[in-house]
Image: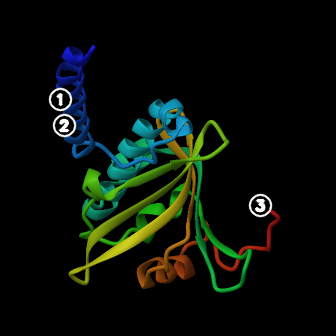
Amino acid sequence: MSQYKPVSFALFTTFALASAAQAGDTVQTPRTAAARAAGDLIARVERAITGYVAACGSRDEKRLSDLTTDDVRVEFTLDQPGAYLTLSSEALMASCVPGVTPPAKQQMWVFPTNDADAVFVQYEVSGISEATTRQLALVEMRGEQIARMRNFAPISSTTVASATLLPAATPCAALTDE
């Protein structure tokens, strides 16, 4: 039986190295059964978030609309618990911060939830005042598109300024039970 141990060890080592190499090329996920089961959702979210940030940074309105549903809601938490600044599809481009760069795949973590279409995403964007900003969002997908994104990171001054100018933004949204 001992003659098989070196072969088993070699196969395990080869598999572990191959897995580590693949992990560097993809988003980070917890090593759980839920994450393995949500593989398709995680891949869709990765493409959508990376594309969303890139479209915002390059001011590409068509790409932004392709990545979001017609009835998308992008929400930003406010200081008052349960209150959100909500932007509809018409207000998204004006709220984008120009020049941000999408997160590197290795800097994006995706955490599945019990909802088949929702995940938490933690990622970093750079280009905002030469600094890297960590983002945390609850993202709900509808197919390949973002249907709702609730951002828990501090709201940018660009977003606040655009919200005061656009009727599609709802500043200080009513408290919700969600």
Label ID, residue 88: none
77 up-or-down from 89: above or below = below
Nearest the viewer among 51 and 46 is 46
In 3D space, how far apart are the residues under numbered discs 3 and 2 (Cα atoms)? 43 Å
Residue at (36% x, 49% y) in the render: 28
Contact between labelled residues 2 and 1, with CB atoms less than 8 Å apart: yes
Q: Residues within 10 Å of mark 3 (few under 14, many from 20)?
A: few
Find disc 1 in the rendering and name its residue. Answer: 14
Q: Which amino acid type is shown beneath numbered disc 3?
A: Glu
Residue at (38% x, 45% y) in the render: 46
In 3D space, how far apart are the residues under numbered discs 1 and 2 (Cα atoms)? 5 Å
Contact between labelled residues 2 and 3, with CB atoms less than 8 Å apart: no
Q: Which amino acid type is shown beneath numbered disc 2?
A: Leu
Q: Quadrant of the N terminus?
A: top left
Label ID, residue 178: 3
Mark found first going from the N terminus, 1 or 3: 1
Q: Can you give x and y, in whole percent of width and height, for residue 120 in the image? A: 53, 54
Find disc 2 in the rendering and name its residue. Answer: 17
Mark found first going from the N terminus, 3 or 2: 2
Q: Secondary structure at mark 2?
A: helix
| Left/right of residue 57 with respect to residue 140 in the rendered view | left
Q: Can you give x and y, in whole percent of width and height, for residue 127 in the image? A: 23, 74
Label 3 or label 2, whichever lies nearer to me, is 2
Q: Residues within 10 Å of mark 2 (few under 14, many from 20)?
A: few
The residue sitting at the right extreme is 177
Nearest the viewer among 100 and 115 is 115
